[in-house]
Image (cartoon, rainbow, N blue to C red):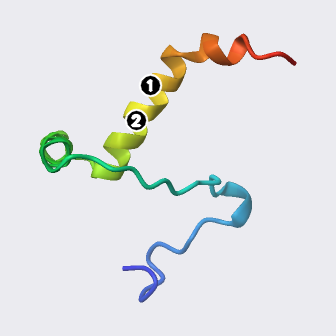
Amino acid sequence: MYPCSNDNPPAPAAQRRQMKRVNIQLSDEAHTRAKIIAVLKGVTLNDYLARIVEEAVQRDRKVLQQMPK
């Protein structure tokens, strides 16, 4: 659809989340398994991996709390 149609115009800049792009290396096997799981869950591989990272950050949040201020 977008950018060819106006059905779903982009959100105003204030509403868009800031995102960073990260490149990671995965074995072919890990990539394939992650992709299959993502498809079976009905999400993109990017969303699946982002969710995994967010969960790990929450689980390890105490590490951040130990940083000197």
- Residue shown at 65%/54% (left/top)? 18
Residue that numbered label 1 is attached to? 55
Quadrant of the drawing holding the C terminus: top right
Asked if 13 appears above or below 58 in the picture, the reply is below
Q: Residues within 10 Å of mark 1 (few under 14, many from 20)?
A: few
- Mark 2, secondary structure of its residue: helix
Q: Amino acid at mark 2?
A: Arg
Residue 66 lies left or right of residue 7; in this view the side is right
- Residue shown at 21%/44% (left/top)? 38
Quadrant of the drawing holding the N terminus: bottom left
Badge count: 2
Residue 57 drawn at (x, y percent) = 52, 25
Residue 66 lies left or right of residue 48; in this view the side is right
Q: Amino acid at mark 1?
A: Glu
**Mark 1 and mark 2: Cα distance apart in space:** 6 Å
Asked if 4 appears above or below 47 in the picture, the reply is below
The foreground one among 16 and 46 is 46
Q: Are marks 1 and 2 in contact (CB under 8 Å)?
A: yes
Q: Residues within 10 Å of mark 2 (few under 14, many from 20)?
A: few
Residue 14 lies left or right of residue 29; in this view the side is right
Asked if 15 appears above or below 7 in the picture, the reply is above
- Mark 1, secondary structure of its residue: helix
Q: Which mark is residue 5?
A: none
Asked if 53 appears above or below 7 in the picture, the reply is above
Residue 56 drawn at (x, y percent) = 45, 24
Residue 48 drawn at (x, y percent) = 32, 41
The foreground one among 17 and 58 is 58
- Residue shown at 76%/17% (left/top)? 67
Residue that numbered label 2 is attached to? 51
- Residue shown at 62%/52% (left/top)? 17
Residue 16 drawn at (x, y percent) = 63, 57
